[in-house]
Image (spheres, rainbow, N blue to C red):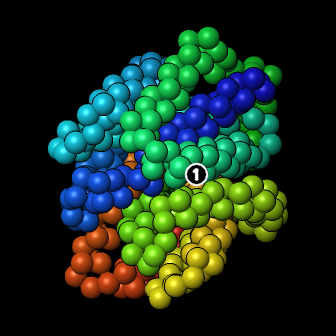
Amino acid sequence: MRAQRIWLLILNITFNMVMGFILPVNTIFIHKNLHESLTTAGLALMAYSVLMMVGNAIGGVMFDRFSRRGTLYIGYAIAIASLVIMSFHHVWPTYAFMLVVLGFGMGLSYTAINAYTAFVAEQMVGDSRTIFNIMYLAANVGIAIGSTAVGFIFKLSIFFTFFIPVLLFLLCIIILLFRGNVLDQTNEEELERESHHKYVSSDVEDPKIKIGASRFKFNLVIICLSIFVVWLGYSQWDSNISIYMIDNGFSTRQFGLVFTFNAVSLLIIQPIMNRVASRVFKLLKNQIFVGTIIMGLSFTLLPGAKTYGMYILSMLVLTIGESIVFPTIPALLSKMSTNKNRGTFQSFYSIFGSLGRALGPYVGSLVITMMSFAHLFFAITIMMIIVAFAMESVKELD
């Protein structure tokens, strides 16, 4: 099933290259180029993420009940249509409306890719965290390539800033047309040994029955709350921190290079943390606990940061934390799911991640306007520490 994983990897990298193109420049473009307020920019990004969240929810249901590839086709088509209009007609309020439509299309695609990852993990022998770690690493490489490239392209051409993502999504559709059948293949020999998997779901033993219905629901609430808070904090890097850096005298290119550093350092950190985590942590919730604490502490380095090195150091600490947290939460959801609800459970990660990204820029802008950037950073640290300890109350099967 190597070909299956390779093509899924390519789709994942390509999707996140588009994310890398779009997210870093949205706040800057709306605030600096379209001359809208920071709060308005936050509202536009919130609307984008809300529709992405709706797309996540619908995408999970479509993946389970309608068509796996069909969900991707529809998501890509909607995203392409909106990006084409944004390329030729990037004025307010058309830009904001197309941004929202783009969010819905990308929401469908994002959940389908995550669900395909769980589908592949279902067939793996051994620790299925491996595929989630690889996919997360690939996602960050895609974001880094996109954010680095857009740092140069944004200055040269607004048109190409939005049209290059169109070409990338067209490439994804071509891959689906000619290699889509590979994604849906199953490995019968590995499926027969499925019961020996360590972190793979099963229809024979429903985790909900073993854990208990009420406690199972409590687990989902804590996990979803953790996803929301972590992404609410992380989304500040995609939005308000860009303004924070520019106000402190740094360029758009320097801001984009922070994400490049994030991806490059992740290439080194991720394999190390993966080995350490698999040996040290027997339960996934403990791994998420430690990673969330580290992510929260990274924001304490930002108040009063005057040198570029402080932003790099903050991103390095954040990268260590995210390398532990972000691949592990989908693996935990996969561990709690069955073959009948794989797409729906993976959509939880997408939905509450999108909700965090939706509210993050707007809530962050309100806190900045009413108080300061420093208050925002400390509030994020406190919230992440709280959800980290809440994660320890999750009942996880061995």
Q: Which residue, given by chain and number where applicable, does mark 1 sit on?
A: 148
Of 367 and 52, the residue lying toward us: 367
Q: Is residue 200 above or below residue 237?
A: above
Horizontal placement of 42 versus 2: left or right?
A: left
Res. 281 in view: yes
- Residue 366: image quadrant is bottom left
Q: Can you give x and y, in whole percent of width and height, for residue 235 in the image? A: 43, 61
Residue at left 37%, top 81%? 373
- Give, as a three-letter code, the residue at label 1: Thr
- Is 71 placed above or below 224 here? above
Residue 306 position in % (x across, y down)? 52, 85
Picture coordinates of residue 313, whole percent (x, y): 64, 77
* Whether residue 55 can be seen here: no
Q: Residues within 10 Å of mark 1 (few under 14, many from 20)?
A: many
Residue 294 % position (x, y): 61, 76
Residue 71 in which image quadrant: top left
Name the residue at the bottom extreme.
Answer: 304
Side (left or right) of 148 relative to 345 = right
Judging depth in this view, the residue of 366 and 322 nearest the camera is 366
Q: Is residue 177 left or right of residue 227?
A: right
Which of the image's four quarters has the N terminus? Answer: top right
Q: Is residue 196 above or below residue 296?
A: above
Determine whether the residue tagged by mark 1 lies in a helix, strand or loop.
helix
